[in-house]
Structures are given as structure tokens and as C-alpha cells.
């Protein structure tokens, strides 16, 4: 359970603010805030047992693959939770994909098989629950589409108004259609995602609760993907966990989960986190190459993987911390690599939107370059459903017929 404060994520600062604080960053040093869970008196063995037993329970909170791990989530009465039974996605063994990458032990965890088709649902169930607890009437986000679709669904469920800011031309029609279907008010912003986020943040109206990934409650929900994975692996950690990197909220969430589980002895060995960016939107790659003390913003981010077309990732410091803690790797792949990998995922019967396929493309490069052992146990997270961006499929095939 999480007590009623948030703490600055900068180790040397540690400033605490009330849980209801709406500033999103530390009032002293400006870094992002985070929740600090206190899982209570249960032993790690008891926690594992509880989490496994809840899989067989039909109680509403237990049927959520997020809230099942509630000892590590914000304290909330069961009947106040806003849930769509998210989080229960399988772990699938790679077949043609494993051959393609040259990996002998490859699994995919497809977070695109969540209620609105992306991993954003894991964070929204927690953050929209919190928005309602705080008495918000309107929730808002800037989005390349998936955050908007997810927020709109959970806001509808919670009876809150949803307002989304989309970069003109930067979100697929399918994602926009979902947001409209769930009743969101949509506003197009000239420019890219970073511009849309700037417009949103400028509308600092205290009646609006912001749901971008700078919101620490979203990070708490997203981190349960790692708890869920470990339960599926019977608590035998993989050697690598691979995910795409855009605004880097999910990288931050996964790093936080690995640290929290390691702290109670449930993460052995520590898996190395591999963050894969699109080459035209590779701010974290550039930042690490330049020493890591200042973010190297990409001013005009490009890639056809629109979900990660972000040049100014807000959670970059938290992502760096995750890389340091896990001995991780950040790398980039180009759009041709992404589309080739995406097609192979399709041949495995899995499918994904382009941003997710960065993971397979990245693993293939790491093994080919001798940086990853072909015998390593590798889990790649897929983040968005294939139906999220059908243009990317049809455009790639135009002329094939
Ligand atoms: C949001 C999103 C990402 C990027 O996640 P970040 O937390 O912003 O790094 C990757 N893939 C898909 C499909 C997404 O929707």
C-alpha cells in the first residue's frame, strides 16, 4: 500500500509532498515525483502466494491483472477502483520471430491485448481511480493516440469528462476513433507530441487532472506488468527485458518494479533492461552517448512508429536510473528494421503496431552483434495491438499484390 505522500525521484532531494499535490514535479528541484509503496507485514513468500491465489478468484479486484498486486499500489477502497479487468495478458513463445532474431528462448508479453489495445490501460486504471478519489471532474492528456484512447475509456467508466490533445497528423485514425467512441473531447495541436504536451501543461487549470506519464500513479499501474510477468515465469527472472522507449514512462515503471522486487528478494538475477528507440526519435540514445547528465532533445522527431515519435522524453532521468540499476542497454533501430520485424511478428500470429516491433528488431541486432547471448532468456514486451495502425500494414504492402 502507498502512504499519503509522494516523494521526489531525485535521490539527493527526497522532498515529500501530499498525495493530492497537483504540481507533477518536485517543488524544490523540479524532478518528477514518485510513489513509495509500503507492502506491509507479509513475507515475500506470502505475497507470491496471495498473488497466485487471486488468479482463481472472481472478486472484481482480483480479476484485474493490475489490482491483484495491490500491496504495491495506492491504497484505495475496493468499490472505488475504476477497472476494466485489464492486465491479464499471456506470455507467448516466439516461433518464427525467435529464428529471425537468432534467440533460443524468446517470449512476448503482449500488452496490446489489454481492453483498449495498449499498455496504457495498466496505468489508467490506477491514475483514473486516483483522479476520482481526488474529486476531479475533468481529466486531460496529450497523446499520440493510445493514451487518449485508454484515458477516454477509463474516464467514461468513472463518469469523468475527458479532454485529449493530439498532434495534427500524428495519431492514427483508429486511435482517434477509439477516443471519440468513448466520448472524449478532442483537440488537434499544430506540431508533434511534444508541442501537444506543452499546450496541455499551459492550461494549468486546477479543475483538470493531468494523465500523462509524468503522473506518478500511472507509473504505479504500469509497473505491475513486471509483477505479472514474474508470476507467469514462476518467479524465475529472465536475463533480458526488452521494451520500446518513447516518453520513457514505461521504462521508468519497469525499472521501478525491478528495484522493488529485488528489494524483497523476488528478482534473481536482476534482468538487464533493453530500451529500444526509433532512430529518428532517439533522445535517450543520444543522451547516454553524451555522458547522461543532460537530455539531448531531438527537435524534429521522425519515425513511422508514431507511438514513440517523441523528441523530449519527460521520464528520461527515471529511465537512466533503470538502465543503471539493471546494467541495461539503450539502442535505436531504423524504420526499415521496425517494419521488417513487424511482418515477422505477424507471421507468428501475434501482430503489433509498429512501435512494439522495435523490440524484435533490437534483439536481432544485439544477437547479430554479439552483445546478447543466443542462449539468454529474453522477454520482449509488445505495447500496442496490430489494429491500432492498419495504414502501416497496408502502405507496406502496396505494390505487393
Ligand atoms: C505509449 C507507447 C509507447 C511508448 O511508451 P513510453 O512510456 O512513452 O516510452 C510504445 N508503444 C506503444 C504502442 C505505446 O502506446
Image (cartoon, helix red, strand yellow):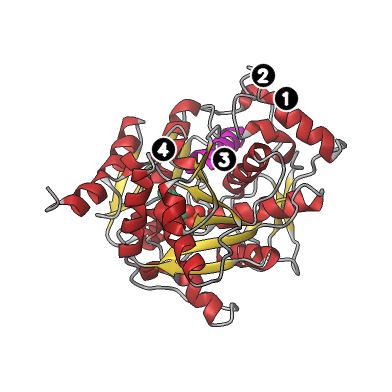
Mark 3 vs mark 2: give the one in front.
2
Q: CA distance from mark 4 to mark 1?
A: 27 Å
Q: Secondary structure at mark 1?
A: helix
Reply yes or no: does residue 399 show up in magenta. Answer: no
The first of marks 4 and 1 along the sequence is 1
Q: Are marks 3 and 1 in contact (CB under 8 Å)?
A: no
Q: Which residues are magenta?
A: 119-135
Q: What's the magenta bit mostly, secondary-structure-wise?
A: helix
Q: Residue furthest top?
A: 58
Residue under label 4: 117
The numbered dot on residue 88 is none
Residue 7 location, quadrant: bottom right
Residue under label 1: 53
Q: Position of residue 83 (x, y in %)?
A: 55, 28
Residue under label 2: 57
Mark 4 vs mark 1: give the one in front.
1
Q: Position of residue 30 (x, y in %)?
A: 62, 66
Reply yes or no: does residue 134 show up in magenta. Answer: yes
Q: Are marks 1 and 2 in contact (CB under 8 Å)?
A: yes
Q: Secondary structure at mark 3?
A: helix
Residue under label 3: 127
Q: Position of residue 359 (x, y in %)?
A: 46, 56
Q: Secondary structure at mark 2?
A: loop
Q: Residue at x 36, y 62 (%)?
A: 195
Q: Residue at x 33, y 61 (%)?
A: 192
Q: Residue at x 41, y 38 (%)?
A: 117
Amino acid at each position: 500500500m502507498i502512504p499519503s505522500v509522494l516523494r521526489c525521484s531525485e535521490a539527493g532531494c527526497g522532498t515529500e509532498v501530499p498525495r493530492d499535490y497537483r504540481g507533477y514535479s518536485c517543488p524544490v528541484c523540479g524532478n518528477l515525483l514518485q510513489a513509495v509503496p509500503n507492502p506491509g507485514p507479509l513475507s515475500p513468500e506470502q505475497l507470491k502466494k496471495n498473488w497466485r491465489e487471486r488468479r482463481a478468484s472472481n472478486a472484481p479486484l482480483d480479476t484485474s491483472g493490475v489490482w491483484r498486486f495491490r500491496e504495491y499500489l495506492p491504497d484505495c477502497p475496493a468499490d472505488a477502483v475504476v477497472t476494466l479487468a485489464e492486465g491479464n495478458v499471456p506470455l507467448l513463445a516466439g516461433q518464427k520471430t525467435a529464428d529471425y532474431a537468432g534467440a533460443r528462448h524468446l517470449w512476448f508479453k503482449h500488452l496490446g491485448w489489454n481492453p483498449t489495445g495498449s499498455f496504457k490501460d495498466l496505468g489508467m486504471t490506477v491514475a483514473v481511480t486516483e483522479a476520482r478519489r481526488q474529486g476531479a471532474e475533468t481529466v486531460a492528456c496529450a497523446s499520440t493516440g493510445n493514451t487518449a484512447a485508454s484515458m477516454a475509456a477509463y474516464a467514461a467508466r468513472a463518469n469523468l469528462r475527458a479532454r485529449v490533445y493530439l498532434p495534427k497528423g500524428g495519431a492514427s485514425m483508429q486511435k482517434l476513433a477509439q477516443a471519440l467512441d468513448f466520448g472524449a473531447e478532442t483537440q488537434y495541436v499544430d506540431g508533434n507530441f511534444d508541442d501537444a504536451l506543452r499546450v496541455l501543461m499551459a492550461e494549468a487549470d486546477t479543475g483538470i487532472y493531468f494523465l500523462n506519464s509524468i503522473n506518478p500513479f500511472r507509473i504505479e499501474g504500469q509497473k505491475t506488468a513486471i509483477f505479472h510477468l514474474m508470476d507467469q515465469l514462476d518467479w524465475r527472472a529472465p536475463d533480458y527485458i526488452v521494451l520500446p522507449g518513447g516518453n520513457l514512462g514505461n521504462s521508468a515503471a519497469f525499472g521501478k518494479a525491478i528495484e522493488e522486487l529485488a528489494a524483497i528478494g523476488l528478482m534473481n538475477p536482476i534482468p538487464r533492461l533493453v530500451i529500444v528507440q526509433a532512430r529518428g526519435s532517439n533522445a535517450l540514445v543520444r543522451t547516454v552517448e553524451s555522458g547522461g547528465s543532460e537530455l539531448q532533445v531531438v527537435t524534429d522527431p521522425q519515425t513511422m512508429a508514431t507511438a514513440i515519435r517523441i523528441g523530449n522524453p519527460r521520464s528520461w532521468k527515471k529511465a537512466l536510473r533503470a538502465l543503471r540499476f539493471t546494467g541495461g542497454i539503450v539502442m535505436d533501430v531504423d524504420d526499415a528494421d521496425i517494419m521488417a520485424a513487424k511482418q515477422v511478428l505477424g507471421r507468428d500470429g501475434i501482430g503489433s503496431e509498429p512501435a512494439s516491433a522495435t523490440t524484435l528488431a533490437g534483439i536481432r541486432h544485439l544477437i547479430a552483434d554479439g552483445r546478447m547471448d543466443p542462449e539468454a532468456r529474453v522477454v520482449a514486451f509488445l505495447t500496442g495491438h496490430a489494429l491500432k495502425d492498419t495504414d502501416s500494414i497496408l502502405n507496406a504492402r502496396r505494390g505487393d499484390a
